[in-house]
Amino acid sequence: MHNIVRKGVGRITRFTLALALAFAMFSGAAGEATAQEILLEGPLAGAPAVRKQIEYRRHRFSVGPQLGYTLLNDYMHNFMIGAKAEYNFTDWLGFGVVGFYAFNAPTKLTKHISESRNLAGDATVPGESNWPSYTGAAHFEDQVALLKSMILGQLAFVPLRGKLAAFEKLFVGIDGYLFVGGGVVMFKQRSSCDIAQGSCGNLDTFRQGGGTVTRELVTRGTFTAGIGFTAYFNDFIGLNFEYRVTPFKWNAGGTDESGQAGSQWVLSQDNAGSLTWDTTSGGSGDYPDGKIDDKDEQWNSNQSVLIGVVFNLPTKPRITN
């Protein structure tokens, strides 16, 4: 009797489980179908991901002043003032032009060299071993290069945008962008000269504290790239920050860095037993050649940070449906 009861209870339990499983599968299928119907036929059918989106850039022209400073300066600080103008074809793509003029101030290194003194307390002067690389404490500031201006065109890509909140009360629209382009850079660097031709000046004159060092204005093509962020305080005015790299070659220190391979300064002894500097000994590298020319130029990444105010026209941005 007990076996019969247990078998009946087992059959009922298995039937109940099967019925519950079937009900669950039916409910899930019905729920999925209902969700699909809402997606395809409900009030959200065909709706965009975002409604009432403010397009701060699309079909707008922006213009404003820019202030900047170059980083990792060896000899001169460069403070830049300029302007930026940009037209945005869409909310994520624009083309702009930026221009800067630079004001220069000596770094601590340049000041230190310009104020250097020898053991006698007099201003340091050049010698045969470092001429024409070094023109003396009195002239060193005149031989280093000066960044003067940049004019650059660039494409801006805007992959990031959103809102920034402060204290849960202040909200500003922001976007992040990448830019790439090119243009021209203008700088002044030490004029080309050659010891053999006497165009670098007279060494004895510089040793006495005299002589002059001249610079020449150079214009070079360059590439530029970087990242930036813009904060929109209202529909019309924004504030932008940029980090920029604009590489080019120049002779930043106005020194004789390289030239004819196989020539180097060595300390040798003449027939009278006196020590003297000699440049006729052979070598295997690219050594100073007694000239200041384009062979002495080296690549400079010319990194800079900038801040600017942006005025947008038309004054009202487009708002999506």
Image: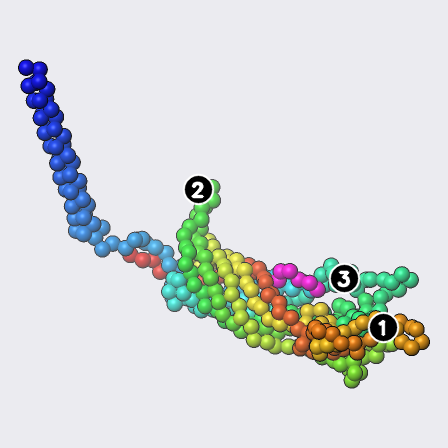
Q: Secondary structure at mark 3?
A: helix
Residue 19 circle label: none
**Label 3: few (<14), some (14–19) or many (≥20) C-alpha neighbours in 10 Å:** some
Q: Residue at x 65, y 64 (%)?
A: 78
Q: What residue sits right under mark 1 in the picture?
A: 268
Separation of marks 1 and 2 at Cα, in angstroms = 76 Å
Q: State which tag comes first along the sequence, 3 or 1.
A: 3
User: What range is drawn magenta here?
Assistant: 70-75
Q: Quadrant of the C terminus?
A: bottom left
Q: Nearer the viewer, residue 137 or 65?
A: 137
Residue 180 within the segment the image draws in magenta: no
- Does the residue at mark 3 contact the one at mark 1 (Cβ under 8 Å)? no
Marked residue nearer the N-terminal end (1 or 2): 2
Name the outermost residue toward the bottom: 197
Question: Is residue 265 visible to the viewer in this orientation of the structure?
Answer: yes
Circle 3 residue: 111
Q: Nearer the viewer, residue 250 or 218?
A: 250
Q: Distance between the Cα atoms at labels 3 and 2?
A: 49 Å
Q: In the rendered view, how is the structure colored? A: rainbow
> Amino acid type of disc 2?
Glu
Amino acid at pointer 1: Ser
What residue is at 31 percent from the left and 58 percent from the top?
Answer: 320
Q: Nearer the viewer, residue 130 or 73?
A: 130
Q: In the displayed structure, does residue 303 sit left or right of residue 231?
A: right
The residue that label 2 is drawn on is 168
- Quick one: SS at disc 1? strand
The amino acid pointed to by label 3 is Lys
On the picture, is 167 further left or further right than 211?
left
The mark that comes first in sequence, 3 or 2, is 3
Residue 35, image x and y in percent? Answer: 19, 45
